[in-house]
Amino acid sequence: MLVRVLLVAALVGSLGACSKDGKVREPAELQDIVNPQLRLSTVWTARAGEGSGKYRASLDVTVAEDAVYAAEVGGRVYAFDPNTGARLWVTDTDARVISGPSVSGNAVLVGTMEGEVIALKRADGAPYWRSTISSEALATPVGDGNLVIARAGDGRVHALSAVSGSALWMFERTVPSLTLRGLGKPVIDGNRVFVGMDNGRVAALRMADGQPIWEQAVAAPSGRNELERLTDIDGALLLDGGELYVASYGGEVACLDGDTGQVLWRRAVKSYTGPTRIGDIIVVSDESGVVWGLDATTGAAAWKNEDLKYRRLSPPAAFAERIVVGDYEGYLHWLDPKDGRLVARARAGRDPIQAVPVADGALLYVLDTAGRLAAIRAD
């Protein structure tokens, strides 16, 4: 099944896309932005090793109050000063890192292709613990200081002790025979954790023992072949004000009640990246690179922007009162959340940006697939 998963990932990540008539859709050419609304500058850049390279890895940039953390698929984990980009420490895990890092209490967490979750000390990167799960840790592991939640490529959800890494419980659901390569990272909220699954369902689990509080189907398989019947929820879930926003490759963006799992609204948008929220607008990009602004209360389309079609967009983020997405040529594009117009652009590098950009105060941190980390300011 691994080979079939990789093939699908390659199809989704291709530069162009084939329509039903067999024509290749090339990435949209960028048009000049007249009178940009933001003045953008690069404050610093740093190198986080080789990045994700040729792998479709879930490598993130993570910001804590004292450092910016990044990792490379070659196994090194890095901490940088958030203001200057100076390297604070680097640790070689001697493994192939495929997800993370994230921060939980005093630990930095990463997942590996070998099926390990590794915890390092935030202060200096020294080894803390490492624990083996059932298969490769495709989703970024997350924690609340007491428990660490990790997701494996075989569909299992593992809970580990944040102190020792020992296994506490496991939740399991059947994985479809064909899936996209990747998993959305879990979202912890108090005594529960939310996970989106490859079968198009979302589950809320009790942190104490992994028992389901509720499960809800967001997308159901449909189509004439396995590729058309993909329903993966691979993007990050967004929990905001008690409501859970979910995007699936099965063709639905949905808003769920976080307490009950009840579907509050659905919108027919097919996406493998997660949504973000700015004001009353939920923003998500679809499989073709069309960026949608949806009303957070009703799901109605407020606007859509087709200027970035087939440019392999990163998940969207909110920064400087606008929406920002990265693309396959290293460009960052800012959109006005009121109408979706492109209002500014900057180039962080020349390699693809797959990780969601992370805003922290006055800076936006961006990591590309070659391991180039940049801090961007908007004035």
Image: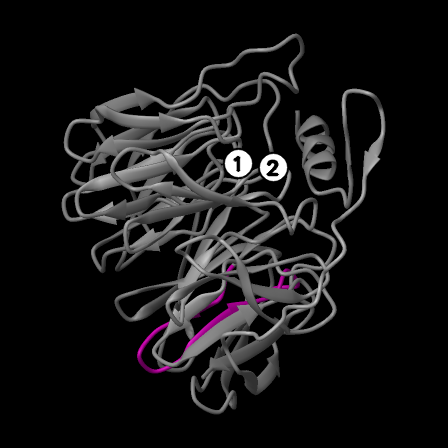
Give the quadrant of the C terminus.
Answer: bottom left
In the rendered view, would you say 98 is above or below 359?
above
Magenta range is 60-75
User: Position of 140 compared to 18: left or right?
Assistant: left
Whether the residues at callouts 2 and 1 have beta carbons within 8 Å, the answer is yes
- Front-lying residue, 377 or 8: 377
In the rendered view, would you say 51 is above or below 240?
below
Amino acid identity at mark 2: Glu
User: Which residue is pictured at 51% across the width and 52% down the height?
Assistant: 315
Magenta segment's dominant SS is loop
User: Which residue is pictured at 58% across the width and 63% down the height?
Assistant: 333
User: In the rendering, at what x and y percent does residue 120 appear?
Assistant: 41, 69
Mark 1 secondary-structure assignment = loop
User: In the rendering, at what x and y percent does residue 48 appear?
Assistant: 61, 74
Q: Which colouring convention does the figure follow? A: one colour
Mark 2 secondary-structure assignment = loop
- Front-lying residue, 255 or 114: 255
Amino acid identity at mark 1: Ser
In the rendered view, would you say 272 is above or below 95?
above
Mark number displayed over residue 15: none
User: Which residue is pictured at 20% across the width and 35% down the height?
Assistant: 258
According to the image, label 1 marks what residue?
271
According to the image, label 2 marks what residue?
287
**Mark 2 closeness class: few <14, some 14–19, many ≥20 residues within 10 Å:** many
User: In the rendering, at what x and y percent does residue 75 appear?
Assistant: 60, 64
The answer to whether any part of residue 30 appears in the image is yes
**Mark 1 closeness class: few <14, some 14–19, many ≥20 residues within 10 Å:** many
Inspect the magenta stretch and tell me whether residue 360 lies in it. Answer: no
User: In the rendering, at what x and y percent does residue 167 appear?
Assistant: 31, 43
Q: Measure the alpha-carbon separation of dots 2 and 1.
A: 5 Å
